[in-house]
Image (cartoon, coloured by chain):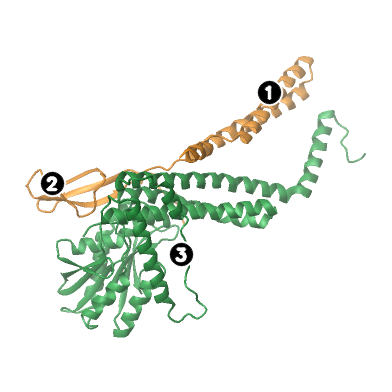
Amino acid sequence: MAFVPSGDIISQIIYAASILLFVVFMLYGQRIQMYVMIREVEASLYKLKFIKEEGRKITIETIKEIGKPQTDPTPRVDRYLEYFTISPQSMDPAGIVYKLDHILDVRDTRLKDEVKIMAPASDEVQVNNLENTLEAAMALNFIYKVVRHYYIQGKKTLSLYVIMQLQMILPLVMKEAEAYASALKAFAYGQPIGDGAGPLVAAKLMHGYETRKLPKDCVVATVPIEGRTAFIIKAEGPGGNVGKPGDAVQAVIEENEGKIANVIMIDAGLKLEGEEVGEVAEGIGAAIGGPGVDQFKIEEALVKYHIPINAVIIKEDIGDAVSPMRKEISDSVDKVIERVKNVILERTKEGDKIIIVGVGNTIGIGQ
Amino acid sequence: MTENNQSSTAASRISTYMLTIVLIILALSIVALLFAVSAFIVGDQVVAGYLLIIGFITMGLSAYLLLQSRKRVANLKIEAPKIMTTIECVKCGFKSIREFQRGDYVYKELDKCQKCDDKMTITAIYKEVKEKEKTYNV
């Protein structure tokens, strides 16, 4: 018994306990680690469930308040939360953009029709806001279900690697879910969100000038800027709407037979950690997110007429983009306009025609 | 709605599993402290010292677990940020800031200006973020 200390009983107990602990950790260390991770995931899943339920509750309450439905909209909302969209087959990618465009149009029309049935007393602006609210609730429902799927799968298989992958991405998933949760209230009340930075700049440039409608759900105003004629385009507000800037830009270019000296796109751009919210950056290319249909259409029109394109972005993170607009973003509008004017002065001549597009969700922003 | 309320309540209370663990640890710590006192009375100061340390550590651990669970419950809230609306008179520059009201939107025309009778316009709607982001000096 040379390995056992010959001291008092307490020392021997502590020694035996430490040996036992060593053996337990050696044999069951990974399993203990997995249980700790499962507990962490479980706690986040509870939080996700709470956020999802709150989202559903806010959505139903908003529909009841605004839409004044005759019947309880709850079953229809629950059905709506499970809606899905199947993207087109990409084995032969030729023409896929227009197929995707068609699918998205059908989805949009279907969702709007559903909202009109659920909330018959709502006007067009409110229908758009309610559609956005429902989409945020849908996103929360989807996030919760996916996390729950991997959590149960991990528990069933007791696979450390399934649980580990889930635990590793969980902070990012939670951040996104919390962003959608705060977006819900913004959409329900019709408050501008961070993604509306582009339309806000466009609205400031076009405010006071006559606007006309463009396909689809967009407006354009002809504004003189620094001796040039600027066509300012944005989605039609103040309802929650991103419009189809691709179609709008194509229409304006075709109206002017391609005689456009420059296209400047303004959008909210994702910031990297360490960068300031509301920072303004300038670059080249079509600054537009989404499924890519609008970017494709804009690029097609630009290539056809060899029109240069510039972009100005306002930096923010994903949480800022879908939650109520931060003061820093609202305050950056004047900086963006300064940068746009610089681009106009440096890249175009007096008398030229230019297009300025404010890309993003125009909820809470008129024109 | 009943199901919804139930799930919200379930999410917002401390789990019984966690509470059982905390209570067991707390009971063990009290037992250790009692043993420590009896060992001290008997005169075995070394054992009393060990038991005292074990008792306090486990008591601290149970308090920490309880606080952590309460913190988690407190986190289960969707906080609505304060949204402000800036209203300006384009003619005289008079500016006022008030809390957001449903129906407000940027460039909405409102009532007449208090100073010049021209129409006031909403020029900004934003949320104020009070907490400062942590900086990493890199």
Q: Name the colour assigned to chain B in the rendering.
A: orange
Pointer 3 chain: A
Q: Are marks 3 and 2 on the same chain?
A: no
Left or right position of A243 against A20: left
Comparing labels 3 and 1, the label whose residue is closer to the camera: 3
Q: Is residue A200 above or below residue A34?
A: below
Residue that carries the numbered disc 1 in the rendered image: B30
| Residue occupying the point 43% across, 55% down | A80
Q: Name the quarter where the C terminus of chain A is drawn.
A: bottom left
Q: Which mark is residue B111?
A: 2
Circles 3 and 2: CB distance less than 8 Å? Answer: no
Q: Secondary structure under badge 3?
A: loop
Distance between the Cα atoms at labels 3 and 2?
Answer: 45 Å
Q: Look at mark 3 in the image and give the residue it sits on.
A: A85
A231 and A189: which is toward the camera:
A189
Seen as rendered, the residue at the extreme front is A70
In the rendered image, the residue lying farthest to the top is B41
